[in-house]
Amino acid sequence: QQQVKQSPQSLIVQKGGISIINCAYENTAFDYFPWYQQFPGKGPALLIAIRPDVSEKKEGRFTISFNKSAKQFSLHIMDSQPGDSATYFCAASGSGGGNKLTFGTGTQLKVEL
Amino acid sequence: DSGVTQTPKHLITATGQRVTLRCSPRSGDLSVYWYQQSLDQGLQFLIQYYNGEERAKGNILERFSAQQFPDLHSELNLSSLELGDSALYFCASSLGTVNTGELFFGEGSRLTVL
């Protein structure tokens, strides 16, 4: 059973545009929502994370928006650059403890010139 | 560089065989996690160890087993391999078990079962 649903599966954005990736979760026990970025041949790396008591968090060009009542959260990449081309995973942790992450299925982002 | 080391990077073997994947966590990290990444399933949590003890179990098959040694390195053993076990296997580590949402991933071991 997939506990974190992610869309779209792939995304093509023009340089300078906004990339938006959406996730939804089911388990209300989740209490930490990180986003990971993965480049080909590398492991995922933490990009930005949010707790459910905050509706938005911004770090540079990356912003997480969180809607607790809808159990949805999204990643916005402003002024998207070719170097942002990667696979992005949303995740959730806190269910059952231990800091283990439940990942979404990933979004392959391509930023074109 | 995350500080997490995984070996081997690539492994090709035949069905029915057994392989061992090795992970050295970041210096000072006590928790080790194993994930399987396949094209159709994304990143699936397999198992977590904390300071040598099993802490959490996910979708790990009975043919798979893991352990964490006193020096904190971990091994994932995959036996009676099937074609469907072909995947990228990631190890990740964190300082402890406190929920921070941050895991440090290695570069993975790519397993191909022929």
Image: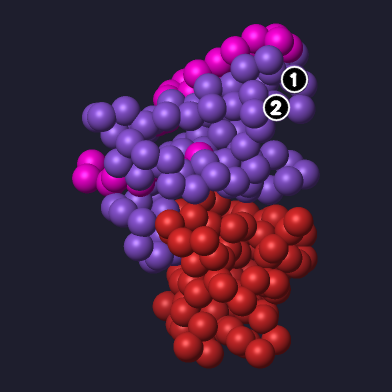
Q: Quarter-wise, where is residue A8 in the image? A: bottom right
| Residue at point 29%, 34% (across, down) | B72
* Label 2 environment density (alpha carbons within 10 Å; few <14, some 14–19, many ≥20): some
Q: Is residue A1 visible?
A: yes
Three-letter amino acid code of the residue under disc 1: Glu
Residue A55, compared with residue B59, is above or below; it is: below
Question: Where does the image place residue A79, in percent across and percent down from the top left?
Answer: 56, 77
Question: Where does the image place residue B91, in percent across and percent down from the top left?
Answer: 46, 38
**Residues indicated by labels 2 and 1 sit on the same polypeptide chain:** yes
Residue at image mark 2: B85
Q: Quarter-wise, where is residue B32 in the image? A: top left
Question: Where does the image place residue B23, in percent across and percent down from the top left?
Answer: 40, 30
Tell me the colour chain A is drawn in: red
Residue at image mark 1: B82
- Chain hosting mark 1: B
Along the viewing direction, whichever of A77 and B51 lies nearer the viewer: B51
| Residue at point 55%, 71% (across, down) | A30
Q: Which residues are magenta?
A: B6-34
| Residue at point 23%, 41% (across, down) | B27
Q: Which element is circle 2 on?
A: helix
Question: Where does the image place residue B77, in percent across and percent down from the top left?
Answer: 53, 22
Residue A95, compared with residue B25, is above or below; it is: below
Q: Please give the letter of the chain rendered in purple.
A: B
Taking B52 as reference, is A90 left or right? right
- Disc sitting over residue A85 in the figure: none
| Residue at point 54%, 27% (across, down) | B65
- Chain hosting mark 2: B
Three-letter amino acid code of the residue under disc 2: Asp
How is the structure coloured here? by chain
